[in-house]
Amino acid sequence: MRCPFCAHDDTQVKDSRPTEDSAAIRRRRQCGHCGARFTTFERVQLREVTVVKSDPRAANSEDARREPFDRDKLARSVTLACRKRDVGQERIDQLVSGIQRQVETAGEQEIASARIGEMVMDGLRQIDTVAYIRFASVYRDFSEARDFEEFASTVQDAVKPARNDG
């Protein structure tokens, strides 16, 4: 593993332990050259999956942009939606790990970005309605305040019966 501080390639693992959700191994490392310490995470990758981006300009699915599935990009999107909300990092990591597991175990080499977006929305709907609306506003490309109002009213309608049963 290359040191992120001095780029030397001789680092030693000082401590290894599973993460709280047991989806990865957390390793504390120390550089043999500069002495800096840093943390890495090792995760199982079941298969390479390609994300097919939705592009209205593409004549067909063969012309659509493709890129490798990126867990970190997914985590950044979910974290941004949950920013300044009472959603712990552990819960975000669980959601992201669950989506990654679904994507990798689906058995497909390619997955539409729209499908991943729907998985995120399903997960955020269960965690935090404000984060859910924030993500939806970007994912569904809200352009006016009316778009927020209409979407928020559908969320409120879905939440009301659950609250009245309690």
Image (cartoon, rainbow, N blue to C red):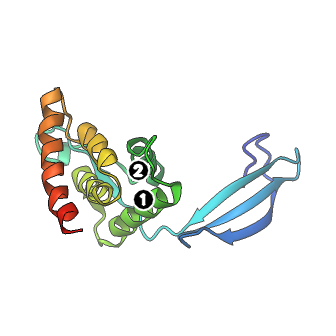
Classify the position of the C terminus by image quarter. bottom left
Verify CB contact (< 8 Å) between mark 2 and mark 1.
Answer: yes
What's the CA distance linking mark 2 and mark 1?
7 Å
Residue at which label 2 appears: 74
Q: Quadrant of residue 104?
A: bottom left
Which residue corresponds to the image point at 17% horizontal and 50% vertical from the top-left? 156
Disc 1 marks a residue whose amino acid type is Val
Residue 115's spot in the image, x, y percent?
23, 56
- Identify the residue at image location x=72%, y=43%: 4
Query: What residue would you read off at disc 1?
Result: 96
Residue nearest the observer in this picture, 15 or 166: 166
Q: Nearer the viewer, residue 121 or 115?
A: 121
In the rendered image, residue 71, in percent from the top left (x then y), is placed at: 45, 54
Q: Residue at x 46, y 40 (%)?
A: 84
Q: Which image quadrant: the N terminus?
A: bottom right
Q: Is residue 118 visible?
A: yes
Residue 57 appears anywhere in the view: no
- Secondary structure type for disc 2: helix
Q: Residue at x 71, y 63 (%)?
A: 27
Horizontal and vertical percent for residue 96? 42, 59
